[in-house]
Image (tube, grey):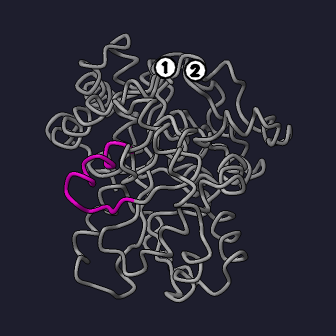
Amino acid sequence: MKITKLLGVSVSSLAMLASVNAAYAASAELIAAAKAEGQLTVIALPHDWCGYGATIDKFKALYPEIQVNELNPDAGSADEIEAIRANMGNMGPQAPDVVDVGLAFGPSGKAEGLFQPYMVDHMDQFSVADSEGYWYGGYYGVMAFEVNTDLVTNVPQDWSDLLKPEYANSVALAGDPRSSAQAILGVYAAGLSASGGNAMDAPMAGLDFFKKLNDAGNFVPVIGKAASIAQGTTPIVIRWDYNALADRATLNGNPPIEVVVPKTGVLAGVYAQAVSAYAPHPNAGKLWLDFIYSDEGQLSFLEGYCHPARFNALSADSMIPQAVLDALPPADAYKIAVFPSLDELDANKTTVTGSWDSVVGANVQ
């Protein structure tokens, strides 16, 4: 339980929550209440992110009485938080019921009173979770390079490679580093590599790295995604491994994609899910959490190339198909992954979002 200790959530507190957890499973009463609400509003869930498209379809099939309203699939974590703030008194379709945000936004959202507690099943199997049930770390991935090998023949293997002249006008982030958790942590991962793993120095080292990348003409200030990779606008994109692997499957060789976990600065990123304190459909939101943390929901994450929170338990119960495991990068690539503490994530978010403009000066769009 290394991650648990880093984040200050004790094993004993998780065990205590697990002991009372049965009362909070997806009960018939909750299902009936959610069906009566008739709608679930999600936000920032691209269908190719962590298999969310298939997960949403499975939820719809299980609960056809509940319409799923999908807001702004390409939003960043900060946008999700702002959507809650902006719709506190709004019971209409623009108010999200649930969010899926970078881990640093979990505790800050709780502290601001934006989330409501709900105890889900299998609490003892979560390595990262709020002890009072305000948010849960449902899955993680590692930062990787997604490379269009039609355009990049010498595939970079580490962060320092990206500074080489051969990668001019080639390297992009998968979000705006002033608001997207994925991009913010892309900067941090580069900083971990540049600083030799020094968590304190990594945020500024990451900004300095991207300044060098930008000054060299290698950085492309465009949000990288499957279309921009295929079109050649962003031949190399820094993004979560599961997003890169999903693109590789979707593009299916047109163009060919190689996914590289770098040799250093291997950063693991946990994403947290929560029910909005101002949710117009709170019971549907709670039912959604029950579903995505169920066996079916967790396996759906894994089929989308994410490592789900309950991976170890599912593996121990021989519930993971070998074909699903074979589609992931070699397990050795994850052995040196760094799981930053919440304090480290907060420090990085503050530094990167506050200093990107002044240090790097590239307006990512």
Quickly name the residue at label 2. 157
Against 16, residue 43 (above or below) is below
Within-10-Å neighbours for mark 1: few <14, some 14–19, many 20+? some
Viewer-proximal residue among 268 and 291: 291
Q: Position of residue 339 (x, y in %)?
A: 44, 27
Q: Residue at x 57, y 41 (%)?
A: 309
The quarter of the picture where residue 187 lies is top left
Against 181, residue 155 (above or below) is above
Q: Position of residue 2 (x, y in %)?
A: 47, 21
| Element type at mark 1 | helix
Q: Is residue 247 visible?
A: no
In magenta, the rendered stretch is: 103-117
Q: Residue at x 50, y 50 (%)?
A: 20
Against 4, residue 115 (above or below) is below
> Does the segment drawn in magenta span residue 115?
yes
The three-letter amino acid code for the residue at tag 2 is Gln
Viewer-proximal residue among 36 and 279: 36
Q: Residue at x 34, y 57 (%)?
A: 365
The answer to whether the residue labelled 2 contacts the one labelled 1, judged by CB atoms less than 8 Å apart, is yes
The quarter of the picture where residue 97 lies is bottom left
Q: Position of residue 182 (x, y in %)?
A: 42, 44
Viewer-proximal residue among 227 and 64: 64
Label annotation for residue 161: 1
Q: Position of residue 261 (x, y in %)?
A: 59, 26
Within-10-Å neighbours for mark 2: few <14, some 14–19, many 20+? some
> Does the segment drawn in magenta span residue 264?
no
Residue, far right: 322
